[in-house]
Structure formats: structure tokens, C-alpha cells
Image: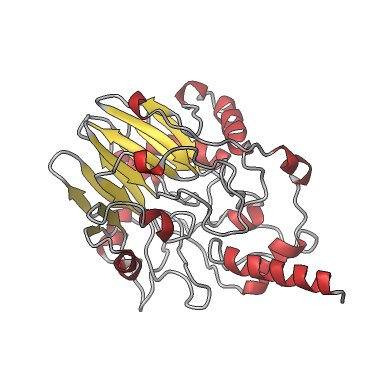
Amino acid sequence: MHRRRFLDLCLNLLKASLVASLFPEAARASVADRPEAPALHYRPLNGRSLREIARRRLHHGDGRFLNPLGIDRSGRLLNVLSWKLFHRNAFEAQLADQPLKPVTVDWKAASDRLAVTYLKHASLMLHDAGRRLLVDPVFASPFWFMRDYTPLDIDRAALPQPDHVLITHGHYDHLDTASLARLPRDVHVVCPPGYDDLFDEIGLHNRTVLDWYESYSDGEREITLLPCNHWSMRNPVVGPNTGLWGSFLVRSAAGPTVYISGDTAYFDGFDQIGREFDIDLAVFNVGAYEPRWFMAQSHIDPRETVAAFRDLGARQLMIMHWGTFRLGDEPVHLPPHHMQAEMAAAGLSDRLVAWEHGQTVSV
């Protein structure tokens, strides 16, 4: 083997190993020989209550968290390598069209009541009656080989300081220690259990840890962690699910209620959440959903997002987790187009709020 080919192979193996910490352990071999995907990529609740699951701590295992909403993810790193090294990407011809869009933000555009600013990837700033909630802050690529298509073209020092930082789970594109280290040491972090060592290392000690259906209130707004169908991993050697994952529900001081999905696959419990909470705005992470035979267990796609949005009974829909990092097969700019097409097919175009990175929208 030529030295250059050998080095390229080693680089690809390294990339795949790190990507394995972002995606499910179970993948199904290459496109040519993979079996048909199962009819369901989640575990039906069959009448089970999400609240009862949380009350009985069925998502707690022996030293690890469990996903009572998902199906078995048992597999090997070789399956991940199969996808990254041998899978044929159906979107290959469109990858050259991925736009590079530096992000600028007009912070004065936020209203005095409730507004949402889309920073990049799955990072947003919720402006609520003079307070700010920053969700999953990732200001740059967590890996040197992962291209950032929406570099922040702003003075980081001019970033409005958040009052609360909400972390949905521990994957590197959501819990980025370098970005968190830029925040004030006394900032209040709201997160699921399992990440104390990371926050202690950064020096962020002002934390509230929430399990599913637990809430925090600062006296004006209430933040609740809700179940979702996902998983977490930081280190393939240590293994998955040493930290929990979840969605957030924010009952704002300004009035509207905002649901923030975090990373989630579809599951049949969104209707339970919708019956319990009156949701004005649902913000779903829609990106890195192709190929479905690999991604369906971890990431919802646009068609499933329509179903989840209907299940929730939310009034408006926004999507993020697109445009910044190409973590799936689809080009970074396609999710909004796919989402618009699915909402139009469902007769719900007027409920979808289109936005761009850096844009602030009043709720």
C-alpha cells in the first residue's frame, strides 16, 4: 500500500471513530447489502405513561442511563465504519452546493417580551422579558476535520451574557467545552444528570440538574426537562449513556410556552406531552437524518417532524440543527427545503416559521 493511501485510510478510521461518539452504535452495513429497515425504529409505548416511566426511573440503569423509548442499539464500531467508509451517498452530487454563510447577529432585534435568535447548528438564544436562555452553545466546530458552514462573524465578547444555559445532552455538537468555557463562571447551567465532571473541569459550578419531568423556576419562568428518544456518548471506549438526554419545555415569563426538542428520533409519546402542556412554539432539531437506515433511531426527519408537531398540538414550528455541520448524508442546506415541502403537503405551511442563522424572530 502506498504511503499516501495508508495515511488516508488512517485518517478515515480516526474520523469514523470520533463520529461514532455522535451517532448510534448500531448501523446496518453498506447500502449494497444492508437489510430492510424495521417498520418501527422506536419502542411503542403501548399505553405506558411517560410520567410513569420517569417516576419509576425506568431510564436509569446500573451505572448508565437507558432509553425506554428506543430499540436495541447493540452493534460494533465496524458498523459505523461501514457507513462512513463504504456507504454510497445518494446526495453526493449536491454536496458541492453547500453554502458557506458567516453569521452576524443584530442583538437589538430582540423584543422586550419573547424572541428567539438562531445562532448556529442547535444553538439558540431565547430572550424572555429581559432575561436570556442559551441552548446548547457551540460557537465553532468541535472537531478539526468537521467543516463549519456558518462561522460566527461576531465579536464573541459582544455576545449578550445568558442568565441560564440549557444543555440537552452530551454529544460533542451540543455540549462543547470550549464554547462553554467562554461563558462567565457564575452562569447558571440547567442540564440532565451525568455531566458533573465536565462542568467541574470547566469551572461551571452553578448548576441545576434535572431528571425527566423535573423543573426549575427562577421565580419568573419555569424550565422542565422532558423525555425524548435519543442517547449520549462522549468516549467510545467508556461507552454510551453515562449522561442523560432530554427535551426542554420553557414556560416563559412573557407568556408563550416553548418546546425545544433537542436531538430525538420519533416516538409515540409526543401526544402525551401535547395533552399536558399548551405549546405555542415547537423548535425541533431537524438535520443529520439521512440515510434513514442509519439515522432513524437517533434523528427525526422532516416527515416525522410533521407528525410530532401535530402530536404536540403546537401552534408554530421552527427547525434548527441544519446548515452548520454535515453530520448526515444530506447537504447542510437541504433540511429547510425538505421541511417546507412536508409542511406544504400536510397543509400546514402557515404554521412553519422560516428563519436563517443569526436571525431573531418574535414569538
- Taking depth in this image into account, of 242 and 165 the one nearest to the observer is 165
Does 238 sit above or below residue 39? below
Residue at horizontal 46 percent and vertical 48 percent from the top: 139
Q: Quadrant of residue 301?
A: top right
Residue at horizontal 75 percent and vertical 59 percent from the top: 87
Does 254 sit above or below residue 295? above
Residue at horizontal 23 percent and vertical 59 percent from the top: 207
Percent of width and height locating residue 89: 75, 51
Q: Is residue 363 visible?
A: no
Query: What colouring method underlies this structural image?
Result: secondary structure
Q: Is residue 75 visible?
A: yes
Residue at horizontal 27 percent and vertical 30 percent from the top: 256
- Taking depth in this image into account, of 276 and 189 the one nearest to the observer is 189
Does 303 sit above or below residue 280? below
Name the side, left or right, on which 62 lies relative to 264: left
- Taking depth in this image into account, of 90 and 109 the one nearest to the observer is 109
Name the side, left or right, on which 41 lies relative to 217: right
Quarter placement of the N terminus: bottom right
In the image, farthest residue toward the left = 219
Percent of width and height locating residue 352: 48, 27
Tally of marks: 0
Q: Quadrant of residue 159?
A: top left
In the image, farthest residue toward the top = 350
Percent of width and height locating residue 103: 51, 35
Q: Quadrant of residue 20?
A: bottom right
In the image, farthest residue toward the right = 2
